[in-house]
Image (cartoon, rainbow, N blue to C red):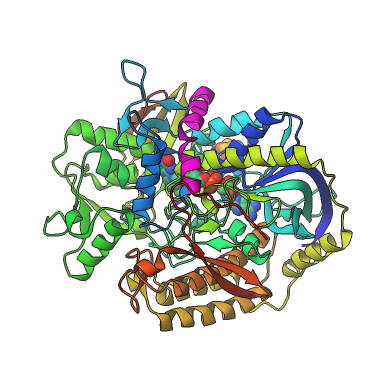
Amino acid sequence: MEIKRKERLETDILIIGGGTAGCYAALTIAVESPECSVIIAEKANIKRSGCLAAGVNAINAYIVEGRKPEDYVDYANKDADGIVREDLLLTMSEGLNRVTAKMENLGLVILKDENGKYVARGNRNIKINGENIKPIMADAVKKLSNVTVINQVNITDYIIENNEIAGAYGFSIEEDNTDGNLSGVAYEIRAKKVLCATGGASGLYKPNNPGFSRHKMWYPPFNTGAGYAMGINAGAEMTTFEMRFIALRCKDTIAPTGTIAQGVGAKQVNALGENYEGKYGITTSQRVYGTVKENLEGRGPCYLRTEGISEAQDDSLKKAYLNMAPSQTLKWIESGKNPSEQNVEIEGTEPYVVGGHTASGYWVDTNRETTLHGLYAAGDVAGGCPQKYVTGAMVEGEIAAKAMVAAIQSENKTLSEKSADEFDKKVAEYDAILQNTTATYSIEQLEEAMQKVMDTYAGGIGNHYQFNESQLALAEEKILKIQELAENVKAEDMHELMFAYELKERLTVCLTLIAHLRARKETRWHSFAENLDYPEKSDEWLKYVNTKKENGKIEVIFRDLVKRGETYEHSNR
Amino acid sequence: MSIVIDKNICKSCGRCLSVCPGSLIKKDTENKAFIKYPKDCWGCTSCIKECPFDAISFYLGADIGGMGSKMTVKQRDHYLDWNIEKTDGTVETIVIDKKESNKY
Ligand SMILES: Cc1cc2nc3c(=O)[nH]c(=O)nc-3n(C[C@H](O)[C@H](O)[C@H](O)COP(=O)(O)OP(=O)(O)OC[C@H]3O[C@@H](n4cnc5c(N)ncnc54)[C@H](O)[C@@H]3O)c2cc1C
Ligand code: SF4
Ligand code: SF4
């Protein structure tokens, strides 16, 4: 197989990743500046791609009546034990209700009481039917005349010229068959501004179910950290990767637990039936840590205590799961036991890097512009702003969209000259993988090797999420070796070429993650970053750990916290 | 976690191919849909909801405690009828009204 067609496209704004943040950004641009041309390059199909594929359970981030955006900032700050950007959290929180109203207008079903008010679930959530949230957004995007969606195009690299973003390269994962022979199509998409909205990274660590059901994971296995990797390789500054996200999930199906915990008030209990929540605390990381500890000390397995709930609650749970994680409902029915008859066993997932839950990602200013001029980041790929969830990702898409439009209008710049050479070089790189005849290891083998190294030496499930400095040093050494081997893989077709890049992306993310885990010499968050050489937390570490790759080396940068009332804007990038 | 596509029911419309968030479904030489990478399936059920002819069902892998039941879903108006067929032949159906929010 070889690349035969080279497509060159031009647009005002390129959006990489047509997920939650990407689609919402496109909807915003259409309102702000309908004459602005937009291309969305999406590796799958925007109809169901990304986190929202199966649907979501609730709007997790909403300012309910009687609360203020500042309250949300406080909550997220506390959960992350201080390592957040308050300026980003506040600008995000202020938009939550606005994007929710827009989604309702587009057709999202939101539960209301007799007075027409949204029904809250706890202090920050509202109840919805989120099964079709992605198709609703995708339909709205497809109707926009200034937006072109190119599905099944996998983006691999940014085009950077004169220290500024100029577009991106990628390829179609479907073969071209126009002349009767299968061949590949590569893309060069030139743009004045680029939004990276590729989501977070899963599949770095050995997953809960490493065999046949290896992709039965919480985070989409298709969000492989492309946006992080492209940024890292282009020298963008990244923040707080060390705040890994480990979700507490229903065993085997890895379905969310919040619905059970909040819906029927189920508590976390150990095998002896003791509620252990109070013992470890109730922040997101403490809930995971408590479960790990109870197991380590011989009181596992751990459960959500659902035994004794009513039949009506059983039914509501089974329905709620069909709208977001159908495998859990199937599991209940198959086992012949409803949640009222059997507690739901829980476990922690493998660690992910995901800026929608924790604070990992691009270091951005309040416009969500990264340290690369003209490149913006929104959603799970953007850092500093945890607990943003689906509505927060939308707000970030909106903020970035408005900033890109404003910049284009004020700069009045033309697209830079095409450089045929660089595109040809990229295509040659794709062809080399498609035509490789000397590969020793398959992509799959190397992925497995990477996940095993991360599991063993960088605090995976197998090591109870713990690590020490010697282990991290080994992790780095071994991942670097695998990275070398990954330079010599073979792809039989265009889909496999995507697999090759997914592997490379993950390896790049792993190395930055390891650098971050090594740099923060404390244990601020149990399980998320549990450094056994530094088991305590210390106020000295109330600062951001950032990194930037320069001349092939990852440099660590420490930055002061951006606190209440302060804002950070880029200077001397 | 994976799906099965019944070749005899598939009408080659291609809808499942385009909707999968991992693009895992392809067409075989007879132009019928098949899952090319079963181990890569996320279990999101997008393809199952998309197929107009109910040709696709999904099951839990044995490694995550699957017991051989198959789940299919039918779109009917603003309802989704989820059917779970157990190995003993019994079928349990749960009807979801898309216009109704989750209770939890
Ligand atoms: C299973 C699950 C359940 C959740 N439930 C809830 C909930 O109930 N409530 C809530 O508020 N939040 C929930 N969340 C969180 C919320 O859905 C996410 O935080 C949010 O959707 C992230 O949006 P995003 O745009 O950053 O990523 P995504 O929506 O995942 O979009 C990323 C997009 O980029 C594409 N992409 C990736 N790499 C490339 C590439 N190289 N080239 C081109 N395209 C690429 C992907 O295919 C995808 O379409 C849930 C998340 C998950 C995973
Ligand atoms: S269930 Fe989801 S991931 Fe699996 S084949 Fe169907 S659409 Fe793809
Ligand atoms: S959606 Fe159904 S009928 Fe259409 S190609 Fe897929 S399996 Fe066949």
Residue A183, position as x, y percentages in the image? 79, 56
For the view shown, which residue lies furthest in the top direction? A115
Quadrant where the N terminus of chain A sits is bottom right
Towards the viewer: B79 or A126: A126
Give the prevailing secondary structure in the magenta stretch: helix
Residue A103 within the magenta-colored segment of the rendering: yes
Residue A398 within the magenta-colored segment of the rendering: no
**Among the 4 quarters of the image, the one containing residue B36:** bottom right
Residue A122, position as x, y percentages in the image? 29, 36
For the view shown, which residue lies furthest in the front direction? A565
Towards the viewer: A523 or A204: A523
Q: Residue at the location (60% across, 64% down)?
A: A505
| Any part of residue A83 in sight | yes
Quadrant where the C terminus of chain A sits is bottom right
| Above or below A475: residue B29 | above
Residue A394, position as x, y percentages in the image? 53, 39
Q: In this figure, what is the number of numbered marks?
A: 0
Towards the viewer: A435 or A402: A402
| Above or below A436: residue A2 | above
Q: Residue at the location (45% across, 44% down)?
A: A389
Which segment is the magenta one? A87-107
| Any part of residue B91 in sight | no
Residue B87, position as x, y percentages in the image? 32, 45
In this picture, residue A532 sits left or right of residue A169: left
* Picture quadrant of ligand 3: top right
In this picture, residue A144 sits left or right of residue A393: right
In this picture, residue A206 sits left or right of residue A261: right
